[in-house]
Amino acid sequence: MHENFDGIVKPNSPEGELLAAIDPARLPQHIAVIMDGNGRWAGARGKARIFGHREGSESVRAIIDTCARMEVKAITLYAFSTENWKRPKTEVSGLMSMLKRVLKRELKTLHGNNIRFQAIGNLYGLAPDVQAELAAATAFTRENTGMVLSVALNYGGRAEIVEAAKKAAEKAKYLRKL
Ligand code: IPE
Ligand code: MG
């Protein structure tokens, strides 16, 4: 694992020391990130929220790159919850177009790094163009055998309970007919 950082992290730098302290055998297999604080980051710098989202997407790039080098098996990014629809229309559309743009831009790199992309959550609730971009990225990286990158969109605890209850009801209906 350490050799994956050769030429990236200098041995005697603070990062190098942190890296040296990592025992690959004790690294988690799956890391999940709840993305938060973008707006506050921007606000603290007197900038519009969308700048914070842009900066957040840069952080995500670094996280994905680092996790892939650390040979983590899976990473899940919680990016947009069902509650996030309540935000101003311009912010929602800004986030959605950024998602499409970043995905398109990073797809070759993801693929080149053998990363398998997938989107999770209630994807049917997303705009058709966003769904199409997600489907394209999923199909493009389907055969990859490296890290699995899941992006959670339109996800929510409440939504998941509703889905689970619906499925259970369907199953009960089916079983009753047997
Ligand atoms: C995370 O940052 C990005 C999304 C959930 C879309 P926030 O937008 O929640 O930023 P804060 O919490 O308002 O600072
Ligand atoms: Mg927040």
Image (tube, rainbow, N blue to C red):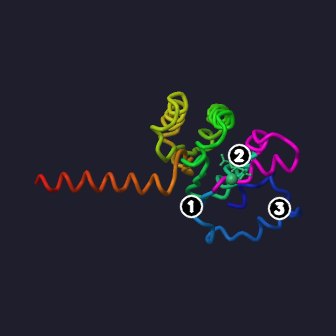
Residue 88: quadrant of the picture: top right
Image spot of residue 76 (x, y percent):
57, 53
Q: Is the N terminus in the top left, top right, bottom left or bottom right quadrant?
A: bottom right
Image spot of residue 132 (x, y percent):
51, 30
**How far separated are the C-alphas under marks 1 and 3?**
22 Å
Image spot of residue 159 (x, y percent):
46, 52
Q: Which residue is drawn at 76% across and 48% down?
A: 39
Query: Dot 3: what SS?
Result: helix
Classify mark 2: residues with Cα within 10 Å, few (<14), some (14-19) or many (20+). Answer: some
Tag 3 near tag 2, CB within 8 Å: no
Q: Residue at x 60, y 60 (%)?
A: 31
Instruction: Give the vertical position of 148 relative to 31 (above or below).
Output: above
The residue that label 2 is drawn on is 61
The residue that label 1 is drawn on is 30
Residue 37 is covered by the magenta coloring? yes
Range covered by the magenta-colored residues: 34-55
Question: On the picture, is 93 further left or further right than 126?
Answer: right
Q: Does the residue labelled 3 lie within 8 Å of ligand 1?
A: no
Nearest to N terminus: mark 1 or mark 2? 1
Q: Tell which of 117 and 23 is nearer to you.
A: 117
The residue that label 3 is drawn on is 15
Q: Indicate the amino acid at tag 3.
A: Glu
Q: Residue 11 carries which label?
A: none
